[in-house]
Image: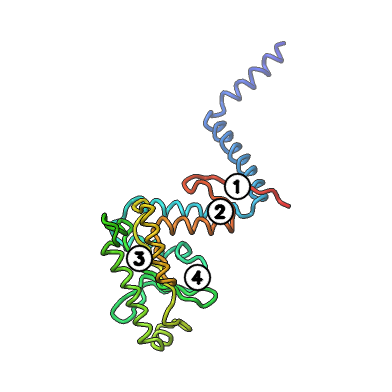
Amino acid sequence: MGMYRGLSWSRSQCLERRPAPLWAERDVLGAVLIAQTATARLSNLDPRASTRRLYASLLGEFKALLDSNPEREQALQTFLQEHPVLLCPTHVQMWPKLAFGATVTDFVFRDATHEYLLVELERSTLQLFRQDGHPSADLTHAQGQIVDWKRYLEDNLHTAQRELGLVGISTNPGGLLVIGRSHSLLPKDRRKLQTMMNESPKLRIVTYDDVYENAKAVFENLLGPIWDTGGATQIYYPST
């Protein structure tokens, strides 16, 4: 019994001499390793998981920027220049702040089919329609900007193609006007927007929320559902 009591005392003494933080650290590291192993196994089932997290984070940043109600258009211009896939997912080339004579575009995009898109950005805090239902001065002015760019192309097509590098651009490329937020639009305003676009088939007028939703749809079509752009939700698909 004495021998066992001595052995028992020695073990107890050894345990007492081990610093408690060391045991805690080992427990934490063990838990992390187990979690990482489980995550790695699940990720092997869905090789798109990391890409989905990347684009979910991008959408979250864009939404946070919009909800901050930036007063300066430049904040949105800078973010979209860094992430042009939000505006034009099919683009293969981009020209930011390209001068068309005395006016300057916010973006010019060319896609894989050599179609061009002229983009005018306005502030996200602007209203698209007045209380009487007519287009606001900001919306009308922005439309006029795109018209001016197309008029410049009509008068200077060869210059745009040769000196600006817009090879193959026509005098009537597509136009995209981004302005305001969707919550400012009533159902009747949406119908008016559609009528305005029907009258100018190569012009799209969208809000920044529309940009967000369109980009999210593109990402989900390619990668699978992105449920919560502000969290860490992951979707795993079984391998086939």
Q: CA distance from mark 4 to mark 1?
A: 28 Å
Residue that numbered label 1 is attached to: 235
Q: CA distance from mark 1 to mark 3?
A: 34 Å
Q: Which of the two discs, 2 and 4, sits closer to the camera?
A: 4
Q: Earlier in the sequence, mark 1 or mark 3?
A: 3
Q: Earlier in the sequence, mark 3 or mark 4?
A: 4
Do labels 3 and 4 touch, CB within 8 Å? Answer: no
- Amino acid under label 4? His
Do labels 1 and 3 touch, CB within 8 Å? Answer: no
Residue that numbered label 3 is attached to: 121
Do labels 1 and 2 touch, CB within 8 Å? Answer: yes
**Measured from the top left, where is residue 72 in percent x and y?**
29, 60
In the image, taking residue 69 as reference, residue 40 lies left or right, namely right
Residue 91 numbered mark, or none: 4
Q: Earlier in the sequence, mark 2 or mark 4?
A: 2
Badge 1 density bin: few <14, some 14–19, many ≥20, Cα 10 Å? some
- Amino acid under label 3? Leu
Q: CA distance from mark 2 to mark 4?
A: 20 Å
Above/below status of 202 relative to 169: above
Q: Earlier in the sequence, mark 1 or mark 2?
A: 2
Residue that numbered label 2 is attached to: 52
Where disc 3 sits, the SS reads strand
Q: CA distance from mark 3 to mark 4?
A: 17 Å
Q: 96 or 168, which is in the foreground?
A: 168
Where disc 1 sits, the SS reads loop
**Measured from the top left, where is residue 165 in percent x and y?**
44, 83
Badge 2 density bin: few <14, some 14–19, many ≥20, Cα 10 Å? many
Where disc 2 sits, the SS reads helix
